[in-house]
Image (cartoon, rainbow, N blue to C red):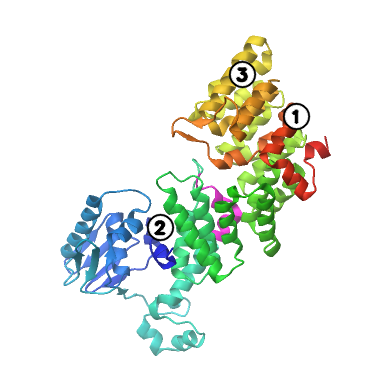
Amino acid sequence: MDLRRAANDFMVTTADLAARDDFRLGNIVISPPTRTIRGPAGNLDVEPRVMQVLVVLADAAGQVVTRETLFNRCWGSVYVGDDSLNRAVAAVRRALADVGGNGVEIETIPRTGYKLTGATAEPAQIGGEANGKDIRKLSRRQLAGGAAAAAVLGGGIWWGSGRWDDASRFDRLMARGDEAFRNGTAFEEWAANARDTPNMVQLYQQAVRLRPDSAKAWGLLGYFTSARAEDAAKQDAPKVVANAQAAIQRALELDRNEPNARVGMFLLQGPMLDWAARDGQLRGILATDPTNLLAMMELMPLLQAAGLTRESWMWNERMLRASPFMRAGLVVRGLKLWILGRVGEADKVINRVRGLWPDYWFGNYARFIIFALTDRPAAARATLDEVHIFDGLQSKGTWLTALDALESRTPSALETARSACLETARRAPPLANDMVMMLCALGLADTAFEVTEGFLLWRGKFLSMDRTNKRAVDDYNRRMTQWLFTPPVAVMWADPRFPKLCDEFGLTAYWRARGVRPDYQAYG
């Protein structure tokens, strides 16, 4: 892959426009943040897409911009037809003419693309009186003629092409990313009720444009793009993966040990590796960067999925020291306390999370699961009615049926619950693991094994498929077997079928390679 081409194909987002400085094209001034074009004949506000096309053409400095590049940079992964681009280019032409842009035109290059002619982009003149407190308010002429110029140039900072300002903007972007790591919002932009969460891919796209020599910025861009590849729509996945690979490769060219790029590579390659290799990759990253939060975020669930709750707990606590308000980490703390038999402490943690973030779905999910699986079905039912956790998956009826069976334990109620859990696991793969835990809590170990073997090993008559999208549940859910090592599933551990399941799924080989035993064997 041509890395320069991949870097240039990153989408210009509305956030990018907001971060751009005003620039001049001949006798007109373009303001991307306000989406305004100002010229001798007046001012004109344009739509975001029109400004995106104009910015991409201006960035090319008179070179031809292909139609493919315009599609990639202005529409990203959204598929649109040629008419959409034709309309956007026509709108740019009208806008330039309406404000009186003398000689500034867009030339069509047949069967290829477009180029901007008549002027090249220059920084817009910055007004305001000079003062020593904000050197960015000084014009280039004022800098060249005063003591401030000597100080700036003597310090080795070059104003030309906006490099001083670019450095400042780069530092602000990286600082914003660091803050998102600390408060956990970097990992929550997917949450339905997330507010004020930065789009991390867009943030680091801006950063690498400002500092294309920053290995860290490229590495973080590679990681967050890789994270999106897991959930990308089928038609978008190839482009997302290609962008992730390009960013990772660029980061590793700049610094072969860049840890964030290596975690991004783990996300792309990890599913192809066995348990021990995945574990070794992550520990290798942490050996060179012991505080790398992204590597810890992958190692912690891997260990829980391998039945090593106590070791996983240690890594989760290290994560929380680095990012104290990472809501997901706090909920995981509560779930691990439950797994370790410290139910009272688990209740306190989850209650506090819900008090701080009452709409956070993961906290509400944990509250419901712990109630349901610690013999408190009435409290679980009240939680289910209160927060509507599973409405989107249309499984509330299944949970209510299961809670009824937990209370009554009658043969008819148990059979009704068994059928409902089995059907939900078939129809909604993300809930297959929850159904296994509930079946175990109901004492229905045979059905729990049927679901588990079909879900993990594609064996038997059970097949868990997403009927809406007509595809199997994503591989991540099939790899992350945390639910196999929760208290209700203890009824499966004592069954001769469980060691065979662990053998086939690769867990036994992992334990042997590391010289460890899972907690249920080591601690009972």
Q: Tag 2: residue type?
A: Ala
Residue appearing at x 44%, y 33% in the figure: 470
Is 413 within the magenta? no
Q: Tag 3: residue type?
A: Arg
Which label sits in the foreground, 2 or 3?
Answer: 3
Left or right of 405 on screen, residue 395: left
Position of 167 relative to 453 (above/below): below
Q: Which residue is mark 3?
A: 418
Residue appearing at x 67%, y 50% in the figure: 299
What secondary structure is the stretch in magenta mostly built from? helix
Task: Name the element at disc 3.
Answer: helix
Left or right of 291 on screen, residue 520: right
Residue 392: x, y in percent?
Answer: 48, 31
User: Is residue 391 or residue 143 the one in the foreground?
Assistant: 391
Quadrant showing the C terminus: top right
Q: Which mark is residue 317?
A: none
Magenta-drawn segment: 177-190
Task: Name the element at disc 2.
Answer: helix
Can I make out residue 52 in this image? no
Q: Which mark is residue 15?
A: 2
User: Is residue 428 or residue 159 the one in the foreground?
Assistant: 428
Q: Which residue is mark 1?
A: 490
How would you rate the neighbour count of disc 2 (Cα within 10 Å): few for under 14, some for 14-19, many for 20 or more? some
Residue contact between numbered discs 2 and 3, judged by CB atoms under 8 Å: no
Q: Tag 1: residue type?
A: Ala
